[in-house]
Each structure stands twice: as structure tokens, then as C-alpha cells.
Amino acid sequence: MEIYLAAEHAYALVPSYSIEVARDRIDQKKVGLVVGTVGALFSNPKPDDIKLLSVENRVEPFWVVAASMTTRYDKSGTYTIPASGPDVREVTMLDQVLPTAQQQRGTPALNSPVVEHCVQTLRMQQAFDALSGTRIDAAKHLGGERVAIDDVAAYAPEGVLVVPPQIRASAVVRQVTAEVVRPVQGAQSIQEERVEIELVDLCFRPVYAFEYEWAARNKRMIIEFDALTGDQRSGGRKLEDQIKGILTTDVLFDITADAVGMFVPGGSIAVKLVKAVVDRGR
């Protein structure tokens, strides 16, 4: 079995909303977002009662992985070909004289053994949160503008907190590949098994986190603003004090032949990993 690994890439997704626009939108809704629906029944604070304490401009990582498996194989079968009428006893086909067989119903038929040459292709694409490893729906984040990151280790835009991934490429590739590496049914012989890891992209999406305080109730709330979609949610978090690890290209993109062998069924299968040549700016 050969496994082909596409060139690995990293991208920064370009915000659709500036931090100023996000703050203005949050300020207009901050009372409802901080107090909440239930709290609003018992309290009615004024906008000035809720103060902005801090703003965190950050980018959060997620993986996009696509893999496919193509299996070329042969399997045996028998084709039953009805004759043209009840009087047919033999048929010459491909310079061979073949007898027909009487059927329980209808006209005689030619039963011809064959070898079927088959191709099975399975494909899967999935996105994963690079902090937790959980699957996510990233479709709404992938349609806009993005900028390639040539050197992940040097990625540090001014004034932006870069949240490093906690999940490596091999972990998410393993999950996607396990769904496409499947044996074919009824195969007599396998001619080729080819797995293509077509896409291994590390993407950073922009998020703004606004921390508000309602001093009268000793309550603090962090409201997150998705800078790509404009979605807002209360109960968010600041990540500045929770950062673990650093951005290191070789650590993040850690797909090796040994790692691939872990998610290929059958421990005795010889795995050949063919990696695309990647210039990572080093």
C-alpha cells in the first residue's frame, strides 16, 4: 500500500469585520448579553452600568483534512446471458463454442465465468478544532479570503494573540484516514491500494473577546465575536493566560511512515509514505 501526502499548508483567514465594528455591535447589545434573558426580568441596568474591561484580539487554529482511498481489484463472477430462443444449444463467442443451459423458466442461457476488474474510491473531508480535537463544521469559515503562512513558527501578527494548536496533524489525519481505508468485499485479488491524503491545512480564524463588568452585581462576562461570520456569544473565555506550547512546524506537521502505519488496518502491511516536497521557508 502506498500513501501519498499532499503538501501541508497553513493559512490565516482574513477578518470580515474589524475589531472596531465588532465592539460597536457588542456595545449595542451588551446589556442583554451580560444580564441575560432571565436576569433582565429582575434587573434593568443602564448601558453605562456595564463597563468594558479588556479586549483580546486572537486567532484560533483548526485543521482541515481530506483523504481518499482507491482500490483496484479483481473478483470472480458468472454472467448469465439469455439465448435468443428455445432452440439455441450452443453459442460461439470470442472464438469459443459454449453450451447453453436450460433454465427453469424462459429460454436457455449462457453461463459464462468472468473476472471483473473493479475500482472502489472512498473520500472524506473533515475539519477539527485544533485545541480539543473535536469535529467542527468549518464551512462558514472557509469561503472567504485567506493568506498563506510560509513559516508557522514565525507567525506573529502585531497586536494579535496566536493560539497554538494542541492537536497535531497526525491525530486528525488518523481519524479521517480510518474512514476511507476499508477493505473491499469479495475481492479475488488486489491490484493496487492507494491512499491520498489530499489536504492537510492548518487554519487560523480571527476571534475578538470583549470582557465586561457589571460592578453592581459583581459580575464579569466575556463576549466573543466571530470576525468572519459576525456571530456573537456570551460565556466566552480569554485565552491569553491559558496558552500552552509554541508554534513549531515539524511538531505540528508530524506525519511520518510510522504514524501512517498506526491507522492502516493490518499490522503486517508494508506502508510506503510518499510526501510532497514542501518548502517551509527554512
Image (spheres, rainbow, N blue to C red):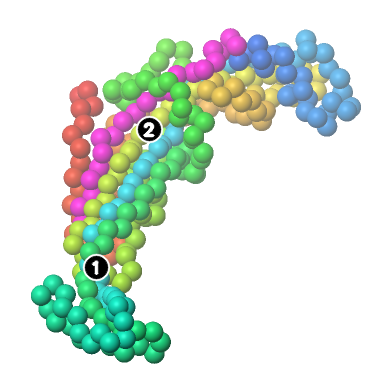
Residue 250 found in image quarter = top left
Residue at (26% x, 62% y) in the render? 118
Residue 5 inside the magenta-drawn segment:
yes
Position of residue 156 in the picture relative to residue 235 (left or right): left
Is 147 colored magenta in this rendering?
A: no
**121 or 174: nearer the viewer:** 121
Q: Which residue is mark 2?
A: 202
Find disc 1 in the rendering and name its residue. 116
Amino acid found under the numbered disc labelled 1:
Glu
Query: Which residue does the image show at 60% across and 15% down from the upper left?
Result: 22
Specify whether 242 is left or right of 114: right
Quadrant for the N terminus in the image = bottom left
Q: Which residues are magenta?
A: 1-21
N-term-proximal mark, 2 vs 1:
1
Q: Which residue occupies 80% across, 23% down?
A: 217
Q: Residue sitting at 34 percent across and 28 percent down?
A: 10
Can see residue 171?
no
The foreground one among 268 and 220 is 268
Residue 71, quarter of picture: bottom left
Q: Nearer the viewer, residue 47 or 8?
A: 8
Which percent across, then down, holds residue 99? 20, 86
Q: Where is residue 262 drawn, in percent x and y?
A: 30, 56
Label 2 sits on a secondary structure element that is strand
At label 2, the amino acid type is: Leu
Determine the secondary structure under disc 1.
strand
Gap between marks 2 and 1, in whole Å?
Answer: 41 Å
